[in-house]
Image: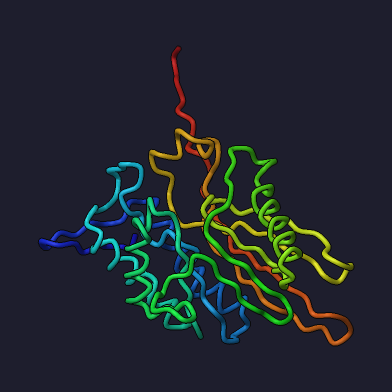
Amino acid sequence: MPPVAKLDFDVEMKQSPLQAIVYRWWREFHDEFVPWATQGNPYVLCHGGDIVDGVHHRSTSQVTQDMKAQEDLAAHDMMPMVAKAAAYFQLAGTPAHDGESWVSARRIAGMLGACKVEGSDSHLHPELRLMIGDAMIQDTHHVSATGMHKAMPAGVTADAMEQFITAAKSGDDCPQVFLRHHCHHHSRAGGFLRDPNVHWHGVTVPGWQLKGPYPWKVGARNHLPHFGGVVVRWVTNPFSAGHVEILPYVRGAGPSKPIIVRGV
């Protein structure tokens, strides 16, 4: 949510206090953290899906349910990051947010000039595989979510195991880095692949959505949402094999203050 959202019929909506805090983190992430983490080098930008709120789960809490206005707002907030990146890829998210057949995400990706799927006119990627150094990154939106902190790395770990088996059965190269979104919480998993110099990394990437009515009836009711993103880079080591380095930017607001009852 930008400081002021200009909607149709000359209507303007301003940020709430919490939206202002999240917007400040959003600016800090792409204005300060990304240049620091990339050390001024060219980088590829990947948005993990759910680029608009949509009208999910029959919610009425959006600033507007006019999808063109939501799409314009999303494109406006993404443009500064896209302009700085060497390339931009847009992942498909959940139809509840991005629209059936991801219609809203398709329009925004086209507006922003996202890289097309090879051999297609679509700017939207259900799955993305990128080579960085000697490592393949597999990035897709969905991952199994949980209401238990101890089980949070299990979703991306399960995906990694399935990818290992699929690669072995098909004889294809296996990804080394697995990025997932969807669960609004940052967690990490990983381990050795073949030897101590070759690791696999599983990362759930934080999101940018404040907690609305829907999460209170599912497992997320016990969680505080994380806000931010990650930078994945390849580090060349002249004395051994290169390796992947993952730099997370994660912010979060604490729980609400308790209500003090006096004189009871």
Residue ranking furthest to the top: 264
Q: Is residue 249 placed above or below 131 in the rendered structure?
A: above
Q: Is residue 189 left or right of residue 65?
A: right
* 75 and 105: which is toward the camera: 105
**Residue 230 horizontal/vertical position (percent):** 59, 66
Q: Quadrant of the N terminus?
A: bottom left
**Residue 80 horizontal/vertical position (percent):** 40, 77
Residue found at x 72% / y 75%: 135
**Residue 187 horizontal/vertical position (percent):** 65, 53
Residue ranking furthest to the front: 170
* 36 and 225: which is toward the camera: 225
Q: Is residue 250 left or right of residue 120?
A: right
Kindly indicate the quadrant of the structure image that contains residue 34: bottom right
Q: Is residue 69 left or right of residue 116?
A: left
Residue ranking furthest to the left: 9
Q: Quadrant of the C terminus?
A: top left
Residue found at x 52% / y 39%: 220
* 230 and 105: which is toward the camera: 105
Q: Is residue 245 placed above or below 223 in the rendered structure?
A: below
Q: How many callouts does the rendering have?
A: 0
Residue found at x 65% / y 71%: 137
**Residue 54 horizontal/vertical position (percent):** 32, 54
Residue found at x 59% / y 41%: 146
According to the image, what is the colour scheme of the structure?
rainbow
Kindly indicate the quadrant of the structure image that contains residue 197: bottom right
Q: Is residue 90 placed above or below 159 in the rendered structure?
A: below
Q: Is residue 245 left or right of residue 80?
A: right
